[in-house]
Image (cartoon, rainbow, N blue to C red):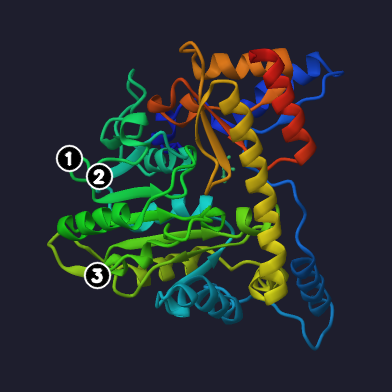
């Protein structure tokens, strides 16, 4: 008799974004004449920039020529890409990360979920609330939690509430987590962490022999010079952190797929009798066993963002999305909404009015003005009463959505 992984039964019915998709589809089938504006899932709308596209085409051409054809690539990723990352994303910021510590992958969603597999089941996981749902759901799938409780929390996860009181920056938890998920610029709240905040977490992790799983997928949206782009800008972090980065939001790769994870050689975790082990070889073992790498043309396309022209082109697209966020921020604020994020981040986090619940607000916008966002409650109980707008939209749609919202609320 085949047995299922029963931990999956603990999960809430569906992943957040398919649930939004389901509601939107139902509405659009019933109202085919309505123009729906989507600002829910953070999926990019602007095409790959010319430098990336050119490199992508060249990579494809190489695959069609016997002299330049490539079969299986290195599981860890091509050295040309890892070297470009080490130089441009880290060395340029004064951070010494070796190309050997970088693992190319097909996405940060996959990596932040899969990373759990190299850590023991007895680890206590610390998660912000609200949070990108992947961290919580994959913790459940891996069997590290108890059941889902009425308060919206899973047993055995250490939740770290983020609210207006702490400016959406988690306080150090009372109970000690072994693995701590942090994400800055934050999804969903759009908050950023200063060096002081990250230093506090790094010191905490060092003192408690914990590991920080740092999701920096949105670092490209940081414009404030004082905000760190990488946790490795903080002294001591290489001993206690793994960092996840992605080309998805930085360079429009949500459909193309390319990301990377950094595991410094200095990082250790412990066996049950307290002996320290390097973490990197475990991830290398997992990667080489279960993954055959990202396709050559995609890695070649990703490397193109590090050329001088590529950097310029990518920056223009980032600025385009940031301008969207600014427009949203301004319109919503002028309507009397409390608005957070959207300055060094592509997400605008809004408090609903009159204590309206997040899903009620979602339905109101969908049904009355055909605008889609993401209900804050979908990211965790502390997200109740909030709503997230994604700035990854076409400019005309952002303007039209804000006009519709203005008519509805002014
Ligand atoms: C989001 O909308 O939160 C993101 O698009 C999800 C993701 O990157 O997987």
Where disc 3 sits, the SS reads: strand
Answer left or right for 224 relative to 257.
Answer: left
- Considering depth in this image, is 353 or 29 the residue closer to the camera? 353
The outermost residue toward the left is 273
**Mark 1 or 3, closer to the camera:** 1
Which residue: 21% across, 58% down? 203
Using the rendered view, name the quadrant where residue 106 is placed.
bottom right
Q: Which residue in the protein does label 2 denote?
A: 124
Which residue: 55% across, 41% down? 342
| Quadrant where the N terminus is found in the figure | top left
Work out whether residue 33 can be spotted: yes
Give whichever of discs 2 and 3 has the lower sequence position. 2
Q: CA distance from mark 1 to mark 3?
A: 24 Å
Where disc 2 sits, the SS reads: loop
Q: Is residue 288 above or below residue 345?
A: below
**Mark 2 or 1, closer to the camera:** 1
Q: Which residue in the protein does label 3 denote?
A: 277
């Amino acid at each position: 008799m085949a047995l299922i992984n029963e931990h999956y039964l603990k999960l809430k019915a569906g992943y957040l974004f398919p649930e939004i998709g389901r509601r939107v589809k139902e509405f659009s089938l019933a109202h085919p004449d309505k123009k729906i504006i989507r600002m829910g899932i953070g999926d990019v709308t602007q095409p790959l920039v010319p430098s990336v596209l050119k490199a992508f085409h060249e990579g494809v051409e190489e695959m069609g020529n016997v002299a330049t054809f490539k079969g299986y690539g290195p599981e860890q990723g091509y050295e040309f890409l890892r070297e470009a990352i080490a130089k441009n994303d880290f060395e340029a910021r004064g951070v010494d990360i070796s190309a050997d510590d970088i693992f190319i992958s097909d996405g940060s969603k996959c990596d932040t979920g899969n990373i759990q597999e190299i850590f023991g089941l007895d680890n206590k996981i610390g998660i912000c609330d609200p949070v990108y749902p992947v961290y919580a759901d994959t913790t459940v799938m891996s069997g590290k939690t108890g059941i889902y409780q009425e308060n919206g929390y899973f047993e055995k996860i250490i939740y770290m509430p983020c609210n207006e009181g702490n400016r959406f920056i988690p306080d150090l938890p009372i109970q000690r987590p072994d693995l701590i998920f942090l994400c800055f610029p934050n999804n969903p709240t759009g908050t950023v962490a200063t060096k002081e905040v990250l230093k506090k977490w790094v010191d905490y992790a060092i003192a408690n022999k914990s590991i920080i799983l740092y999701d920096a997928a949105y670092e490209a949206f940081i414009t404030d010079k004082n905000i760190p782009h990488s946790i490795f800008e903080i002294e001591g972090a290489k001993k206690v952190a793994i960092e996840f980065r992605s080309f998805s939001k930085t360079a429009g790769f949500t459909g193309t797929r390319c990301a990377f994870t950094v595991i410094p050689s200095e990082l250790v975790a412990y066996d049950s009798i307290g002996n320290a082990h390097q973490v990197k070889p475990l991830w290398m073992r997992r990667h080489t066993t279960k993954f055959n790498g990202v396709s050559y043309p995609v890695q070649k396309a990703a490397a193109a963002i590090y050329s001088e022209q590529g950097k310029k082109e990518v920056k223009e697209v980032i600025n385009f999305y940031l301008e969207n966020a600014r427009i949203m921020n301004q319109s919503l604020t002028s309507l009397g909404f409390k608005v957070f994020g959207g300055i060094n981040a592509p997400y605008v986090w809004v408090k609903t009015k009159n204590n309206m619940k997040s899903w009620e607000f979602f339905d109101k916008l969908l049904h009355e003005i055909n605008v889609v966002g993401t209900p804050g409650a979908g990211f965790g109980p502390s997200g109740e009463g909030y709503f997230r707008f994604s700035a990854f939209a076409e400019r005309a749609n952002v303007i039209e959505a804000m006009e519709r919202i203005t008519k509805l609320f002014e």
